[in-house]
Image (spheres, coloured by chain):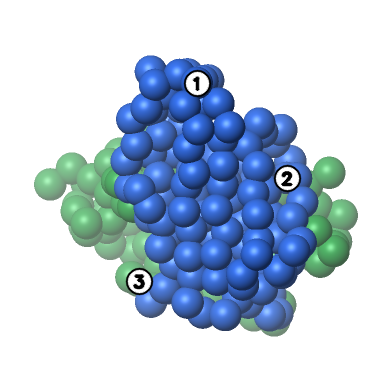
Chain colours: A blue, B green
């Protein structure tokens, strides 16, 4: 089983607040990803990282930012949350070779 | 550009019936292909994957999928569905580019009637 953890599982917050979604993995994977998923819709890649100090924007434009200071940790930050940020955020990681992704359970974010 | 389509948004089957979920992809070379399942409130779990070799791949929970290059398809099948199979199913395609990304289809929601 995958060892990738996301916290919090659910977050309800008011507009304008700064939030950080946590993602940690204990598999030593270099590659990590953030996906955004609206209900009933496909996943969209918003950020990815190939390793420490490496971060890239994904296919879907996002106002969020990420950092990768440690291999195991890939937090996502929204400086000022807005209702349009309401969505599910899924973190994933993968190791060497063909791209089997391990997913966390996701964070369901609701911005009021 | 890579893309993945899943023509069926929602499928309902009776428990014990067979299942086929369709997936078509667009990609310039031989892709890596995946099927993931997402149970309500959970993250995604890999069911099976195709990288090369035998075009019929076996996965977990009794699922299998067949890669058909001529049809650009990677349909998921199960001979007898169980109530616990009710979930969202995502087909995905990965590339060999340096982006190392996996593109997901829109998903097919499966309901199982007892």
Q: Which mark is residue A16?
A: 1
Query: Could you tell me which secondary element the residue under label 1 belongs to?
Result: loop
* Residue at mark 1: chain: A
Q: Residues within 10 Å of mark 1 (few under 14, many from 20)?
A: some
Tag nearer the camera, 1 or 3: 1
Q: Nearer the viewer, residue B43 or B66?
A: B43
Q: CA distance from mark 2 to mark 1?
A: 24 Å
Tag nearer the camera, 2 or 1: 1
* Residue at mark 3: chain: B
Same chain letter for marks 3 and 2: no
Residue A46 visible to the viewer? yes
Q: Within the image, what quadrant is residue B70 found in?
A: bottom right
Q: Position of residue A2 (x, y in %)?
A: 42, 73
Viewport quadrant of the N terminus of chain B: top right
Compared with B112, B8 (above or below) is above
Q: Which residue is mark 2?
A: A58
């Amino acid at each position: 089983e995958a060892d990738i953890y996301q916290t919090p599982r659910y977050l309800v917050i008011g507009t304008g607040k700064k939030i950080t979604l946590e993602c940690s993995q204990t598999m030593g994977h270099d590659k990590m990803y953030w996906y955004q998923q609206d209900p009933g819709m496909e996943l969209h890649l918003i950020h990815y990282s190939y390793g420490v100090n490496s971060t890239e924007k994904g296919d879907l434009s996002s106002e969020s930012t990420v950092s990768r200071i440690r291999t195991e940790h890939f937090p996502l930050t929204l400086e000022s949350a807005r209702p349009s940020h309401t969505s599910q955020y899924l973190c994933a990681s993968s190791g060497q070779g063909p791209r089997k992704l391990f997913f966390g359970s996701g964070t369901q974010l609701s911005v009021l | 550009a890579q893309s993945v389509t899943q023509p069926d948004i929602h499928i309902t089957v009776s428990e014990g019936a067979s299942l086929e979920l369709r997936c078509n992809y667009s990609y310039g070379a031989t892709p890596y292909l995946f099927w993931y399942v997402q149970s309500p409130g959970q993250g995604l779990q890999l069911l099976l994957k195709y990288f090369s070799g035998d075009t019929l791949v076996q996965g977990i929970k009794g699922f299998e999928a067949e890669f058909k290059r001529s049809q650009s398809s990677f349909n998921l099948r199960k001979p007898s569905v169980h109530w616990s199979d009710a979930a969202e199913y995502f087909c995905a395609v990965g590339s060999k580019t340096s982006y190392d990304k996996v593109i997901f289809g829109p998903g097919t929601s499966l309901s199982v009637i007892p």
